Amino acid sequence: MKICRGLSLSRSVYYASRRPKPIIIDDIKLRAAMKTIHHQMDATYGTRRMQIELNEMGYKIGRFKVRRMMEQLNLLAKRPKQHHYPIGGKPSAVASNSLNRQFNPEQPNTHWSGDITYIRMGKGWLYLAVVVELFSRKIISWAFSDKPNSELTTRALQLAMNKRSPTENVLFHSDQGAQYTSESFQRYLREHGVICSMSRKGNCLDNAVTERFFRSLKSERVNY
């Protein structure tokens, strides 16, 4: 070829220089993978989770580059909107923290935990109450309502009792929310021989298993 002769280059060197560089091809694949992850996870992944997912797919990439590329591709993670619970009545009972962060019982259906959270629905909120069986870490019952009251939490616990029918006094752990300290909920516990345990005020780690479930649910599956 004239160009090769003029530059004193062999044909092999010339054609090699025209091949796409592997790093460019990898970047194209990487960008496509990031867009796919962002879409599949409903735009909930930030840089840390995006990096973990990419590493598991075989892309060796650091968090700084992930952040830079997400900014370039405008792959912004959604953030939950602020929510305020309606102010309830005066609590009727606060139990001690009998569970004491012992989240690994030796037998099933001896230790349960529960909590309530909110989910954005259009212009309003939907409230979800769950009961977790701590031995298996499974959600054994749940209930929805448009009101975050004790009727909701009682219904979730009723479903768990009907489903599991524990033979011994099961310990039920929750926070000190009005939905759990109310007289009606406490009466249900007494009538069914359920031992009440509550987190210390303002200490979410005392109910870490249920809190972790809600965090995963919202960050991975719930659109805000």
Image (cartoon, rainbow, N blue to C red):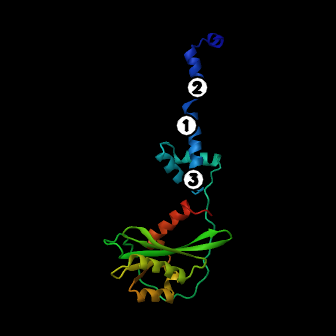
Q: Nearer the viewer, residue 28 or 139?
A: 139
Q: Quadrant of the N terminus?
A: top right
Pinpoint residue 72: horizontal percent, then vertical percent.
Answer: 64, 46
Residue name at image x 64 percent, y 46 percent: 73
Amino acid type, residue under disc 3 in the picture: Gln
Q: Kindly identify which residue carries mark 1.
A: 26
Q: Quadrant of residue 17?
A: top right
The residue sitting at the right extreme is 123
Residue name at image x 35 percent, y 76 percent: 110
Q: Kindly identify which residue carries mark 3.
A: 40
Q: State if disc 2 and disc 3 touch (CB < 8 Å).
A: no
Residue name at image x 53 percent, y 48 percent: 63
Q: Is residue 32 left or right of residue 136?
A: right
Q: Earlier in the sequence, mark 2 or mark 1?
A: 2
Q: Quadrant of residue 147?
A: bottom right
Q: Earlier in the sequence, mark 3 or mark 2?
A: 2
Pair 3/2: label in front: 3
Q: Secondary structure at mark 3?
A: helix
Q: Quadrant of the C terminus?
A: bottom right
Are there few (<14), some (14-19), or many (20+) residues within 10 Å of tag 2? few
Q: Secondary structure at mark 2?
A: loop
Q: Kindly identify which residue carries mark 2.
A: 19
Query: Can residue 199 be seen by looking at this rendering?
Result: no
Spatial CA span between label 3 and label 2 = 33 Å
Query: Can residue 49 be seen by looking at this rendering?
Result: yes
